[in-house]
């Protein structure tokens, strides 16, 4: 009787022994395959060299050197929005932005407060006269909205062993039109700028350039020249930027680079 019972149960045992393990094999494969497919992409992202996207990395070192406060920089590596006809509505809107920014920046006159709030000095290993303290979270938020009280970076001047607050910088995505930039800050009052036509050295790095023809101050400003020199051409290094000095006394000084 026992033998007969075992014989009758054999089909069920075969099902359990063959089908159930196969099911778990298929389930494991289905779960693991997407992860395996994603691995090369993740590895590629980790190994890829950093781009010159200043929306992501803030001002590159060469860009910092190319800018001097309260000066309107011209040349083949700078692009500016067109200055529109002044009007009272724009002037009022710009003044409101300045008032909001001035109030928001008051606490950052102590640079240690800025550090506590996530602002990090760009290239602290060097000793320029002027520093950008950038905030990654603010930079991300600036891609999707504009808040006058939350600039992307703070502008400081070296003062002995400390820093003296000068102003702030707003950023916007490179794909924004001038009308969209005007919605953030009126173009009849101020001009946004972008760093363009950059030829990087053959290794493609964004470090300080040692050869006159390369970098943010380089003599090369076209893709064909850059290609001939063996460099890597960057049409626009990052997004749009605008500096504001809300503690100055006149609109011209407040909105002038």
Image: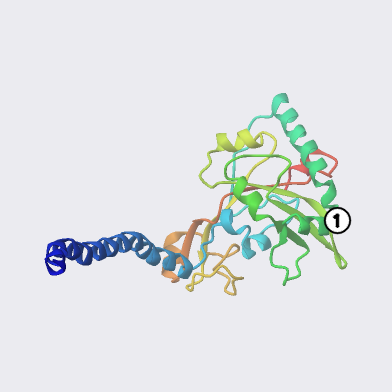
What residue would you read off at disc 1?
110
Q: From this viewpoint, which residue is outermost toward the right? A: 160
Q: Secondary structure at mark 1?
A: loop
Q: Is residue 26 above or below residue 173?
A: below
Foreground: 33 or 121? 33
Image quarter of the N terminus? bottom left
Q: From this viewpoint, which residue is outermost toward the front? A: 1
Q: Name the spot of residue 59 as percent of width and height, x first.
A: 63, 58
Horizontal side of residue 115 vs 209, given as left or right: right
Q: Name the spot of residue 100 as percent of width and height, x first.
A: 78, 37
**Residue plotted at (51% across, 64% down):** 199
Q: Choose top left, top right, bottom left or bottom right for residue 58.
A: bottom right
How are the colours assigned in the image? rainbow
**Residue plotted at (44% across, 60% down):** 223
Residue 176 seen in the figure: yes
- Label 1 CA crowd tier, 10 Å (few <14, some 14–19, many 20+): some
Q: Name the spot of residue 90 as percent of width and height, x first.
A: 70, 29
Foreground: 94 or 252? 94
**Residue plotted at (49% across, 59% down):** 234
**Residue plotted at (84% across, 44% down):** 247
Q: Choose top left, top right, bottom left or bottom right for residue 22.
A: bottom left
Residue 193 seen in the figure: no
């Amino acid at each position: 009787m026992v033998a007969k019972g075992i014989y009758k149960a054999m089909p069920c045992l075969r099902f359990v022994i063959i089908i159930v393990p196969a099911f778990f094999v298929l389930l494991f494969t289905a779960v693991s395959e997407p992860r395996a497919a994603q691995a090369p992409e993740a590895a590629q992202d980790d190994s890829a060299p950093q781009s010159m996207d200043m929306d992501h990395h803030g001002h590159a070192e060469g860009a910092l050197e190319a800018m001097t406060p309260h000066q309107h920089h011209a040349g083949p590596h700078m692009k500016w929005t067109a200055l529109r006809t002044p009007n009272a509505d724009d002037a009022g809107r710009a003044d409101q932005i300045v008032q909001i920014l001035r109030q928001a920046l008051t606490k950052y006159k102590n640079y240690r407060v800025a550090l506590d709030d996530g602002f990090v000095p760009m290239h602290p290993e060097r000793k320029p006269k002027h520093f950008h303290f950038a905030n990654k979270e603010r930079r991300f938020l600036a891609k999707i909205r504009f808040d006058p009280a939350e600039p992307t970076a703070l502008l400081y001047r070296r003062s002995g062993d400390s820093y003296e607050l000068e102003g702030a910088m707003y950023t916007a995505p490179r794909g924004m039109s001038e009308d969209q930039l005007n919605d953030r800050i009126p173009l009849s009052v101020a001009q946004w700028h972008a760093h363009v036509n950059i030829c990087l050295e053959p290794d493609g790095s964004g470090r300080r350039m040692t050869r006159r023809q390369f970098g943010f101050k380089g003599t090369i400003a076209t893709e064909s020249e850059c290609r001939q020199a063996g460099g890597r051409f960057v049409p626009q290094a990052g997004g749009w930027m605008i500096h504001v000095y809300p503690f100055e006394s006149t609109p011209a000084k407040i909105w002038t680079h």
